[in-house]
Image (cartoon, rainbow, N blue to C red):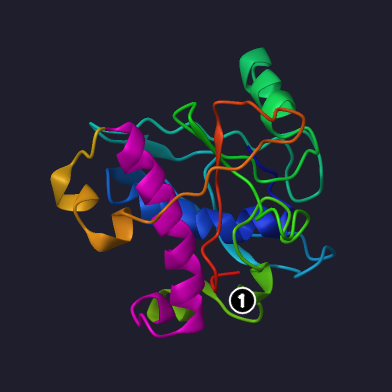
Amino acid sequence: MGRSYCPYCAAERWSIIVALSKFGNFSGLTYMLSSASDIDPSTPTFSFVHSTYSSQYVSFVSVETQDRSKNTLQVPSSDEQNLMNQWDPGGAIPFIDVGGQYVVHPAPSSPTLHSGSQYDPSTLSGQNWTQIGIQLDSPSSTVAQRINGAADTLISAICKIDNGQPDSVCSQSYAQIAITQAPIPDEPNAAHRAVQSRPGIG
């Protein structure tokens, strides 16, 4: 769950796309920028609003509640809103739930860092989609390390709840990142776990 104007959502979408592309295919993705007046203005990203995702392993539901001008865009269902209220009482966005077993949270040492994103959106500042895409093909680049590092935690969470399928993905080292168990705010005994950034990717 996110908002179109949000730079943290903009950054995390790159990692979501990289991660989910290992399990299926997107169609209908469109280019989009985060708000021009927010922190890290006009961060290059994509919109999920009119896209579709197909996979035999994973289903993906995206809810963008506001557009770039903060007007209402999509309305979450009551179940979706209750899920966010329960596991993300602080309202950090983006809010990502993986299979009802994992949620993305900032690391406990920096609970407000990057809102709900796993890395700093400024990594993408001043660049366009082509420039970012070129750097994604260079594993040593900062852009690749940030986007792919965050994607790896999502891939690893998906593989854990999908019984390691498909093996062609889940047997890879990038799909075997240790996911840290951590208490969810106000839910110290919760079954959900926090998918946290690995040291060095934020």
Q: Position of residue 135 (x, y in %)?
A: 42, 81
Q: Residue furthest right?
A: 37
User: In this rendering, would 89 be left or right of 160?
Assistant: right
Residue at x 55%, y 26% (from the top left corner): 191
Q: Position of residue 145 (x, y in %)?
A: 46, 74
Q: Which quadrant of the view contains residue 87?
A: top right
As for residue 47 lying within the magenta part, the answer is no
Residue at x 40%, y 37% (from the top left corner): 52
Q: Residue furthest top?
A: 78
> Is 98 above or below relative to 8?
above
Q: What crowding class fits label 1: few (fewer than 14 Cα within 10 Å), some (14-19), or many (20 or more)?
A: some
The residue range painted magenta reads 135-162
As for residue 147 lying within the magenta part, the answer is yes
For this rendering, which residue is in front, 134 or 151?
151
Q: Which quadrant of the view contains residue 137?
A: bottom left
User: In this rendering, would 90 be left or right of 77?
Assistant: right
Q: Which residue is mark 1?
A: 123
Q: Which residue type does callout 1 highlight?
A: Thr
Residue 60 is at least partly visible in this image: yes
Residue at x 81%, y 49% (from the top left corner): 69
> Is 40 above or below relative to 87?
below
For this rendering, which residue is in front, 154 or 101?
101
Q: Position of residue 25 (x, y in %)?
A: 29, 45
Q: Secondary structure at mark 1?
A: helix
> Is 201 above or below relative to 155?
below
Image quadrant where one finds the N terminus: top right
Residue at x 66%, y 42% (from the top left corner): 2
